[in-house]
Image (cartoon, helix red, strand yellow):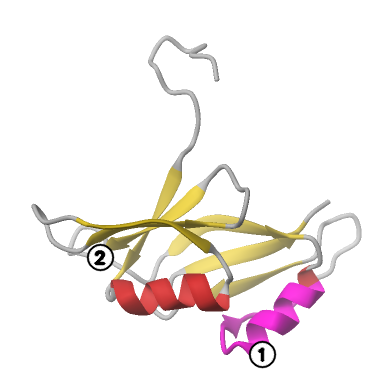
Amino acid sequence: MTDTNGVGIVGVNTIGIPVVDQDRALAFYRDVLGLEVRVDAPLPQIGGRWIMLAPTGAAVSVSLVLANESTPSGVETGIRFEARDAGRAYEALSERGAEVGELLRWPGVPAMFAAHDPDGNRFEVVESP
C-alpha cells in the first residue's frame, strides 16, 4: 500500500467491538459466525486480551475489546459482513442461535439482515453484489 495522504495511514486493519465477556464473545464470533481467530494474546498492563477475528482471507478484522464506561457494549457497530448468499447465511445463523432480524430483499439492493451478538452489538450481513 502507498501512503498517498502524507499521514502514514495506508488501510483499515481492525474494527473494535465492545464486549463485556471476551470468552463469550469469542465463542460467538468464532463458532456462530465462523470467523477465524487471528490473534488472542493477553494484555497484562490493562487486563483482558487482544482478540482479532476475520473471515478467512479477509483484509479487515474485528477486535473484541473490553467494554467500559466510555465504550459501552450494545451498540450499532456499523459493520457490514459480506455473504455470498444472504438467505443461506440467515438460515445458518438462525439455526446456530444468533439473534437475527428480518431478511430484507428490495429491488436493486443486495439482500441483507441485521443480527446481534450476545452483548447486544448490532451488525448487518449483506449479500455480495
Q: Is residue 13 above or below residue 79?
A: above
User: How far, Cα to Cα, is label 2 from label 1?
Assistant: 28 Å
Which residue is farthest right? 107
Residue assigned mark 1: 95
Look at the image and tell me in which quarter the N terminus lies.
top right
Label of residue 67 in the image: 2
Question: At x 43% / y 77%, what residue is drawn?
Answer: 27
Task: Answer yes or no: is residue 127 visible.
Answer: yes
Secondary structure beneath disc 1? helix
Identify the mark at residue 39; answer none if there is no mark: none
Inspect the image, locate mark 2, and give the three-letter code of the amino acid beneath it: Ala
Residue shown at 27% from the left, 66% from the top:
72
Tell me the magenta residue range.
87-103
Residue 7 versus residue 121 in the image, above or below: above
Which is nearer the eye, 107 or 34?
34
Name the residue at 55% across, 78% down: 32
Crowding around mark 1 (Cα neighbors within 10 Å: few <14, some 14 to 19, many 20+) is few
Q: Crowdedness of circle 2 by 10 Å Cα count: few (<14), some, many (20+)?
A: some
Residue 67 at x, y percent in the picture: 25, 65
Amino acid type assigned to the residue bearing label 1 in the image: Glu
Instruction: Report the side of 71 relative to 47 (left or right).
Output: right
Q: Is residue 36 left or right of residue 21?
A: right
Of labels 2 and 1, earlier in sequence is 2
- When asked about the image quadrant of residue 52, the answer is bottom left
Q: Nearer the viewer, residue 11 or 107?
A: 11
Q: Is residue 122 magenta?
A: no
Q: Quadrant of residue 94?
A: bottom right
